Structure formats: C-alpha cells, structure tokens
Amino acid sequence: MVMLVDVPRMTAWIRHTGAERIIADIAARLETDYARWPQFDKVERIAAHSPIGVIELMPIADADRYGFKYVNGHPANPARGLQTVTAFGAYADVHTGYPILIAEMTLLTALRTAATSAMAARHLARADSEVMAIIGNGSQSEFQALGMRGALGITSLRIWDTDPAAMDKLQRNLEPHGFTVYRATSARDACRGADIITTATADKALAQIVANDWVEPGMHLNAIGGDCPGKTELDTDILRRADVFVEYEPQTRIEGEIQHLPADHPVTELWTVITGQATGRTSPAQITVFDSVGFALEDLTALAHVADAVQGTEFAGEIDLVASPADPRDLFGMVVSPASVPSSR
C-alpha cells in the first residue's frame, strides 16, 4: 500500500497544523536541502505548451529519494470556475523504485512557494523590512504574506490587483490573521514605501508589472508570477540595476525574468548563497531580485515533509497502487480467473 494525502486530508492537515507553521517548517527543511544542492540529479522541467496554458513534469532525485510533480498553468481557468494552477506529486524510494507517497500538490505548491520566498528573503531582503507589496492577489498571495511574516515579521501589506474582487478576497482572508492591509490604487501606489515587492500575476503575456523608476534602493523584489517563455513581470532595466538570484539557472533562462537578458548577464544561484560560496545582500542600499520560477527540489522537500509529518496519523490514507503478486515473477497469475487455475489433484 502507498500513503495517500488527497485534497480532504491535505486540507485537514493544514487546518490542524496551521499554514504559517508548515511554511516555516518547509522553509527550514529547504535550507538544509539547498545546502546539499550538488547531491541532486537535476533537470529543467519538461513542459508541454499550448496557446492557452502549459502542463509540466518536474522530476528530481538524490541517492535515496525520487520525486516528481505534475503541474499545469492555465491563466484563463478562473473565468471557467477552475484553478489557474493544479498539481499532484509522487515521492519514491530510489533503492526499490516503489512509491512512498502520492499527494495533492495544488495546496502544497502554494505552501512550498511561500517557503521558498521566505528562505530567499532571509538571505536577500533587509533584516529591518517592515512593508510588503503584493501585486497580483490570486491564489498564492495569502501564503506569500504568511511566509514573509514568518521569515521577517512583516505584518503591513500594500496590495493591488486589476480585479477588485481579488483584493477583497485577500483583505478578507488576511486582516483577521493580524495583517494591516492597505488597498492601493495602482501597482505604482502599492510599491510606494515597500521594502519587499512580490509580483504574483498569472497572465502568460509579456507585461510590465513593476517599472524601473518605482524601485528604490534597498528594495527586495520577489518575482513569483506564472512563468513561461515570453512571460515576465519586471521592467528589464530593474534587472540591470539589481543583483539577481535564481534557483536553477538553466530553467530560469527559459522561463524567468532573465529570459530577455543576454545569456552572459550575471546571476547567482541561491544555493551558493546558502552555502556561503556567494554573497546575498551586501548593503542596505542594494537592490535584490529573486527571479523564482519554482524548482523540483522544492517539491521534493515539501513531499518529504508531508510524508514525515502525516505518517501514522489520521491525515494519511492508503491507495493500493502497486501490483504485488505472491510470487514477484508471476504477475499474470493475478489476472487469471481462479476457475482457470489447474487443480493440484
């Protein structure tokens, strides 16, 4: 039997444990895994693009565990009453090839994305950051706010979305959790006075969400929007002014903000900062950009955390996913009718 954490169980676990605590726990575990980055077998995610969206497979492994996530990104889905992003994943034992866990990953992706943003901000944002701007108030936004509060203690938010209903939703969800929410009148207004700017838009089109002249010395920009070839959120001049940090450069060159920069434009992979091989923030006036497109290591870490956290609890179900004949060499015997098996007499 394989452990199963489906949507009802994942939802119940998050409610029981608390999203903010889970984000902080995954962020701590991510720090450990990023510190052993060279131990992982890595590849850019495998994408199938269409005019209206993308479906991706994100695999990764180390010497003991293998994981993958199936994830889509379809910006027009909300108009049809569907999620922009949905996902599920698998976590397996490298030594046997047997799956350990099958899990929903729509909710889990939001948690691990917030955890990754929080981990990066601890290294790249000013430690005295107090105000966060969130541009794009969709499914990721509340999780991002909780992650930044856990990492830096931020409770003051400046929010903006082209859809007022999205702003209503974010304000309704976060104010009862102790956040002060300012509803900006524009993206520029949201950025004014912010220490951290998180962009989390879903449109696949090339768009300038944040202009260069809105960015002040000392800001940290956390670009997490639905990345794909042709999709960016930041004025390219921002990237030329800032120090840019990425997860896995080969993937980010295809899908991230840096796709419109020359191939030799310098970027720093975040794992080198975590291990001390490179520096993150070096001064209060430095502008930093985390060009985050999401990477499979983050999914593997999140799946491992879920497996450890729910095993043996009410939040772990089972699914009979692996055929297991009594004789491993006799798979056909499982599908033969009992009546057709010759009598031993």
Image (spheres, rainbow, N blue to C red):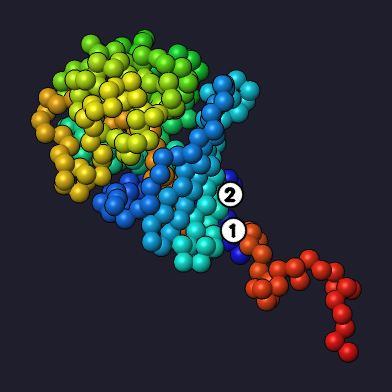
Q: What residue type is labelled 2?
A: Asp
Q: Which percent across, then down, holds residue 77? A: 58, 25
* Image disc number at residue 10: none
**Against 172, is 321 above or below?**
below
**Which residue is at the front of the view, 130 or 332?**
332
- Mark 1, other Cα within 10 Å: few <14 / some 14–19 / many ≥20: some
> Relative to 150, is 140 on the left or the right?
right
In percent of the image, x 56 and y 30: which residue is there? 83
In percent of the image, x 64 and y 59: which residue is there? 321
**Which residue is at the front of the view, 198 or 298?**
298
**Against 274, is 153 above or below?**
above
Give the residue pinned by disc 1.
317
Q: What element carries label 1?
A: strand
Instruction: Report, in whole angstroms, how far the alpha carbon at label 1 lies from the one at label 2.
Output: 8 Å
Say which quadrant the N terminus sits in: bottom right
Give the residue pinned by disc 2.
6
Q: Earlier in the sequence, mark 1 or mark 2?
A: 2
Q: Can residue 224 be seen in this view?
A: no
Q: Do the numbered discs 1 and 2 sit on residues whose CB atoms are within 8 Å? A: yes
Q: Give the residue furthest to the left.
A: 283
